[in-house]
Image (cartoon, grey):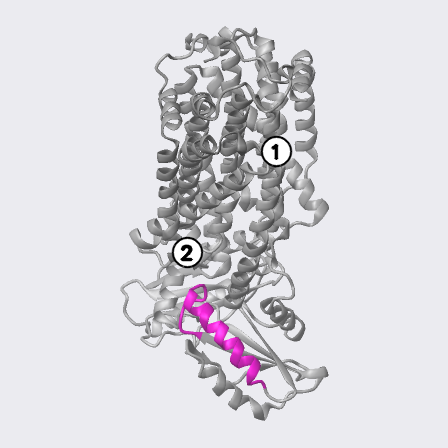
Amino acid sequence: MFHRIGQFVVKRAWWVIVAWVVAAVGIIGTAPQLTAQTDQSSFLPRHYESIRASVVQQEAFPASFTPSAFVLFERQDGAPLAGPDKEAMARVVKGLEDKKVKFVEHVLPVSDQSTSKDGKYALSAVGMEKDKAYTPEAADSAKDLRETAKKLAEGSALKVQLGGQVAQNLDQKDSSELANALIGLGTIVIILLTLGIIFRSPIIAFLPVVSVFVYSMVANGLIGYAVKAFGLKADSSVSAILIIVLFGVGTDYFLFLMFRYRERLRAGDDRKEAVVNAVGRVGEAITSAAGAVIVAFSVLLLSSLGMFKAMGPSLAIAVGVTAVASVTLVPAILSLIPEKVLFWPSKAWQREPESAKFAALGRLVQRRPVVVAVASGALLLAFSAAALGYKGTFDLAAGSMPKTKESMVVQDTMMKAFSAGAADPSHVFVKGKDGAKLDEAAFPAYVAELGKVPGVALVVPKPELSKDGTVADFTVMLKDGPATNEAIDTVTDLREVAHAKTPAGTDAVVGGVTSIYKDINSAMARDYSLVFPVAAVLIMLILGLLLRSVVAPWYLMAAVGLGFTATIGATSLMFQHLQGEAGVMFMLPMLIYLFVVAIGTDYNILMIARLREEAAEGHDPRTAASLAVRHGGPTIAAAGFILAATFGTMLLAGNIFFSEIGFSVAFGIIVSAFVMSLFFTPALTALLGKWAWWPGHAQLPGHGTEPGTVRTPEPAGRH
């Protein structure tokens, strides 16, 4: 089939290119734009307790004041706040109220309750319209608030800073824009340099970059359509990851095709025939690899969390567009460029190097498959053992931007000067059954029970009552920061007490940011037990269809699983033990799954497809392994290096979250390419022999097939 696709593309190359350009212009010009979404609660299903608590709060306290930002006051010299400072603070608060900043509803005055015990710090809480607090426009309001507050404090001894959720969103936006620029630039530079070194041709170096720009815009447009059509909660924050996926995967597939195209030229094919044969030979591997990635991404639709439910299909669309372009647009372009122009100024494309390093690696696998399999497997197991020490953390704000950002400085100051959980207190909502009014006489005893929970710093003695008297809001301050594992453990205990000790005839639900993180934690555990097994089964089916085997998919997926656990282990060692972090970001295992398991499978597929191809041409299992490493190794090594290096550019972003993603995925890709695909997979396949292809082994030479069914070996120049 792919041979026919290659013929069609080569014969109608200009039509294929024009069709892509027209489609790109049409899709880009009409696609809806993605908007940022920063409200983590919107990513959870409604049956979780934190979301049910949010619903109760909205219905019972529609006008309740939930601070969206905090203005932090302190003296420039660090001394306690005095009388003139209090007058200056009042002037700043009044000025902010009078300014009528967009979306801002309240700016509360400083009080004794909002002043630290040592008198050095004071807070003014800012309330914004509830349906606007998490929108991109709210970040602009935060910028206005911050600048106005500083101007109003000029001439006084006060130092004024803005923190809280909307301020964090503003700082996060600024950090993300810089990170995206650095990642995009770093990715392009790495691709250009690496391809330039490999092929010694500026045209080949620029070709995938230009191509990816075209179909990345197509992919973004299609993602916009999908989000609108299916109501997904995708947002523009996925852009940094999307850049790397498109350039990484696009370059991978370009290399798959380019190496095979050059190989066919060396075998004596003319340009157009070489393109057709390259598509015919590698098209199935590209499609199968893309299929495995698309399936792995799409399975995230089963996730409980909206962030992954949207990210999976978005990335699947991007990979699908990339795969289609790789077997249509790229071959069409290659067929139109004379080889002497394409490879200029190098002439090395005309002959294969005699002392190829990968030929030596292939001979090692051929002679010592047991040693190679055991050594590479032991390395994976060693890193996998470290995964037992993995701990997840939930402080996305601290992880996604430098600690020097103003909102992070305010957060740290508030945690030291006030209760660590004061910025985002938890709320226990008690509701009368069947709309019955609450008995306020039972409140003191209930407050006392809540206060006994380990990790609770303070329970506000008098709860807020709804207008009809059927719901009470008990505000609970935690001793630990709202995003810490200790706070999540406290909320777990708080829920048990809140449910068990409710006054007669009432029900209770616990809400707040920490409660949301608690439910996200539960949702992640549920997702791991569902998403991973389903994805594994579907990827194994794809491998089985590609290889006509029920044996190979099992050890291939076992290898991928070891790569996954080894990556988690290495990341835990790097950040928890070497850098002293409390843990790694809670979503990291899912992201490792997305990129290491899904994309890393590409290299296994390319290698195993080459192994079967060599076996089908009559080579014994060990020779087939040697030749597969010799000819497939350069492609896998180059693709793995580029993809690992592009993810490594995330280390330039300057924040822990991107650093963890960059390190973990780069490590996982290196393991997938240089340990699994080059050593573990071919060594195991060599040991299993033709039984690796059972029941499809009957189609291989020596198993009763007709001589005519075995493909004629390629010209000697190929080897």
Mark in the foreground, 2 or 1: 1
Q: Do the residues under discs 2 and 1 have CB atoms within 8 angstroms?
A: no
Q: Which residue is mark 1?
A: 695
In the displayed structure, 534 sits above or below 472; it is above
Q: Quick one: label 1, few (<14), some, or many (20+) residues within 10 Å?
A: some
Q: Residue 215, can we see it?
A: no
Three-letter amino acid code at the position of disc 1: Pro
What amino acid is labelled 2 in the image?
Ala
**What residue appears at the point 70 percent right and 86 percent down from the top-left corner?**
436
Secondary structure category for the residue under label 2: helix
Residue 84 in which image quadrant: bottom left
Point out residue 179 in the picture as x, y percentages from the top left corner: 44, 41
In the picture, the quarter occupied by the C terminus is top left
Q: 183 or 608: which is nearer to us?
A: 608
Out of 197 and 716, give the one closest to the viewer: 716
Question: What stretch of residues is rendered in magenta?
Answer: 478-502
Horizontally, residue 649 falls left or right of residue 157, namely right
